[in-house]
Image (spheres, rainbow, N blue to C red):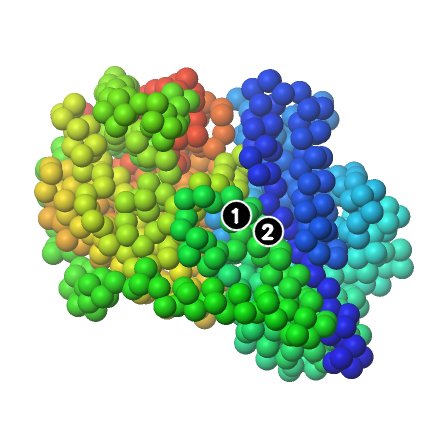
Amino acid sequence: MTSKSAAAAARATVYGYPRQGRGRELKKAIEGYWKVRVDADALRATAAELRRANWRQLAEAGIHEVPTGDFSYYDHVLDTSVMVGAIPARHRAAVEADALDGYFAMARGTQDVAPLEMTKWFDTNYHYLVPELGPDTVFTADSAKQVAELREALALGLTARPVLVGPVTYLLLAKPAPGVAADFDPLTLLDRLLPVYAEVLSDLRAAGAEWVQLDEPALVQDRTPAELNAATRAYRDLGALTDRPKLLVASYFDRLGDALPVLAKAPVEGLALDFTEAAAANLDALAAVGGLPGKRLIAGVVNGRNIWVNDLSASLATLGTLLGLADRVDVAASCSLLHVPLDATAERDIEPQILRWLAFARQKTAETVTLAKGLAQGTGSITGELAANRAALASRANSPITRDPAVRARVGAVTDADARRSQPYGERTAAQRAHLGLPLLPTTTIGSFPQTAELRVARADLRARRIDTAGYEERIRAEIQEVISFQEKAGLDVLVHGEAERNDMVQYFAEQLTGYLATQHGWVQSYGTRYVRPPILAGDISRPEPMTVRWTTYAQSLTQRPVKGMLTGPVTMLAWSFVRDDQPLGDTARQVALALRDEVNDLETAGTSVIQVDEPALRETLPLRAADRPGYLAWATEAFRLTTAGVRPDTQIHTHMCYAEFGDIVQAIDDLDADVISLEAARSHMQVARELAAHGYPREAGPGVYDIHSPRVPSTDEAAALLRKGLEAIPAERLWVNPDCGLKTRGWPETRASLDNLVAAAQAVRAELPTAD
């Protein structure tokens, strides 16, 4: 096909869309179902209407081919486990009794049965439920969800493309089931899994699918020859099927590398590549393999993960380069739009000048349609859109909001000594133990306590001016008093003030720093029904005044036990924001670190002896390719040390991480030079403790013994058993006892019971230690 005919064929599509609805209707319906206020039929009706609204919106915007199957009650990887029949043995009875309740039991657990492990979806803040597989796993096809949603879209008269997690990625994301040898490789189940995918593909074809998209983002990571061979076999076998739709294999988040020749040669009809995160690498690799003759290429040229307007002229240039490299070139966002908010026009509090710089899911859809039109009909057909786009880009580039000379001068003056503590850890720890006087196996929590309906009402009342600032602060003081009183009665050793005044661990700080913008409706799914509003990092960062000192100091005045100061670290402030893309991330991280350094120093001056700087996103933001990791880890660990290195030796610095694969970054954790780290460990059965021990990690650590992302209350015996596992890897003088993560999302009854059991477990195990007397 000539370049001209390839351009004429250009159409717009997306890989996925936000699930929650404009008013987070899905979250409300699901949580209502959990609380028995909404029945199953009403929940299904809400979900169906949200799907229809999304598809209509996409079609009306000009999207030619809408995605189906990307919608989920909780997580699309969990949906895949259901589709292939990979139900853990402990959940089978619940699933057989009621499929919907069993589904949520796998996601959240019950009082009697633990949920699936949860971790981050590649380098995003979206969490997926980890498949549990073993040599005895038997896969069975269940395509009911995928077929039903396809039929719903087709009934609306739409062209629809089902989207599935690909078989190779599914197995690479899986872990050995409990009781299975740790060295079991789920990829060995590929030949057992492929017939199930074949059956699902046949069902989708029978239901009317012309194309099916198989997502293989795991192939943008470094892969062994055996793993690449598995991809070769998977798409050789699936491509050889006679009873199937056309196959589109999609990748995103990075360059395909060695997997590109594998997929280019595979007997599939199309590939989707990311031309935002790795434009040059994928372009060069595509040219090197001779393009995709006879195949469809979907070019992801609109960034599906950030919120800045697309440079339409640059994207058109990329698309023009791709013409002639494929039989047909279509236009898409780089990945599912699940990772961005729904609609920028809903924001009323952002200045119109700045709002024109932003593109949420609806705006990205429009950009995709515009680019497809420009590619197919020429730039003359989108003259107005190009002019408006150039004006928006120039407005942002020339805005004084983006640059603060004083901030840049301060960053430029940073030296290596600014990122080093005055004494090494071995000397600091003796000073801290003498100063704090804590017992062996000290107990604490991660920071937040339940955000009750009363607290949310108080914040809403303040915004609506139904109460004044004094009335609001009185409610916060009362909540802090209750939290401190409970912790003292429960017997916790290091307390927290509970963060009653905080709406979110990133947004709270962003609202008090220059350079950040907050949204009112910019909700993005983190996991299940947990949605966050990532702030927008638009300009240079500074801290006009203290942010946390007042409430931390007040909490400390209520108790003789140490109260932790609680901050969010610089990497997480970037990772859980929509970060500026007009300067290197390391430069932005140093700006945030210096602002936080001022806060850390002010906390210490106010008498805070324990300061926790959370960095749960350190692993999440790790580049997907090993070659890119050293540069990232260098600036990321430096930013943490720059935040924390200005304190006295007897001030104890904590950090916290959760729900990620920590084994990849144990050296980086060491390089942070924190005195204590707390980490998620309950669902992974203390795996991280073993990883720290294998590395020879020399500092104190608190691998979690209470899974806070499940409503179940762990018993004292259960917490004690996990604690004893932790002691097998970490000596008692360096082991802390704590939950996996903050308690913001939990209710007070389960929190009280769980923490009572946690303290009782610590006391029981402490009594077993030789040094207990």
Q: Which of 181 and 189 is in front in this view?
A: 189
- Residue at horizontal 10%, vertical 42%? 605
Q: Which of 401 and 690 is in front in this view?
A: 401
Task: Give the amino acid at mark 1.
Answer: Thr
Q: Residues within 10 Å of mark 2 (few under 14, many from 20)?
A: many
Q: Which residue is identified by label 1?
A: 345
- Residue at horizontal 21%, vertical 32%? 551
In the rendered image, residue 83, in percent from the top left (x then y), is placed at 73, 42
Residue 119, compared with residue 589, is above or below; it is above
In the rendered image, residue 748, in percent from the top left (x then y), is placed at 39, 20
Front disc: 1 or 2:
1
- Residue at horizontal 56%, vertical 73%? 313
Confirm whether residue 626 shows in the render. no
Task: Give the amino acid at mark 2.
Answer: Arg
Q: What element carries label 1?
A: helix
20 left or right of 663?
A: right
Quarter placement of the C terminus = top left
Cα gap from disc 1 to disc 2, whole angstroms:
9 Å
Q: Do the residues labelled 1 and 2 touch (CB within 8 Å)?
A: yes
Q: What element carries label 2?
A: helix
In the rendered image, residue 145, in percent from the top left (x then y), is placed at 75, 39
Q: Which residue is identified by label 2?
A: 362
Q: How crowded is mark 1: few (under 14 residues within 10 Å), some or many (20 or more)?
A: some
